[in-house]
Image (spheres, grey):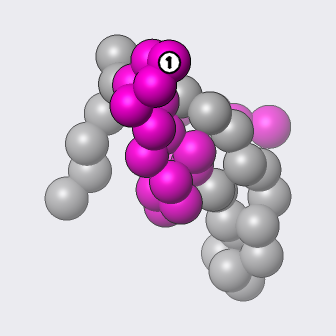
């Protein structure tokens, strides 16, 4: 289950029909735990 502050990796970017991103989240061992689509306003950039 995702929680605020989890860090993911952008796998793919989409422009049509709407701008969206496919994001993969992993655990501390590097195993994928969740893959979800998000719209830009649902994401926060982490540097």
Disc 1: CA contacts within 10 A as few (<14), some (14-19) or many (>=20)? few
Q: How many marks?
A: 1
Q: Residue furthest bottom?
A: 29
Question: Does the image show residue 32?
Answer: yes
Task: Provide residue 43's location: percent of width, then percent of height.
Answer: 39, 30
Please state the extent of the stretch shown in magenta in the rendering. 1-23
**Is residue 12 rendered magenta in the image?**
yes
Residue drawn at x 34%, y 16% is 41
The location of residue 24, given as percent across then percent down, is 63, 56
* Quadrant into which the C terminus falls: bottom left
Q: Position of residue 20 (x, y in %)?
A: 46, 30
Relative vertical location of residue 18 with respect to residue 26 in this rendering, above or below? above
Quarter occupied by residue 42: top left
Q: Quadrant of residue 31?
A: bottom right
- Which residue lies most toward the left here? 47
Foreground residue among 41 and 15: 15
**Residue drawn at 39 percent across, 31 percent down:** 15
User: Taking 38 as reference, is 18 above or below it?
Assistant: above
């Amino acid at each position: 289950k995702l929680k605020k502050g989890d860090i993911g990796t952008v796998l793919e970017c989409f422009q049509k029909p709407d701008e969206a991103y496919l994001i993969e989240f992993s655990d501390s061992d590097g195993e994928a735990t969740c893959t979800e689509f998000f719209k830009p306003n649902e994401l926060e950039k982490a540097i």
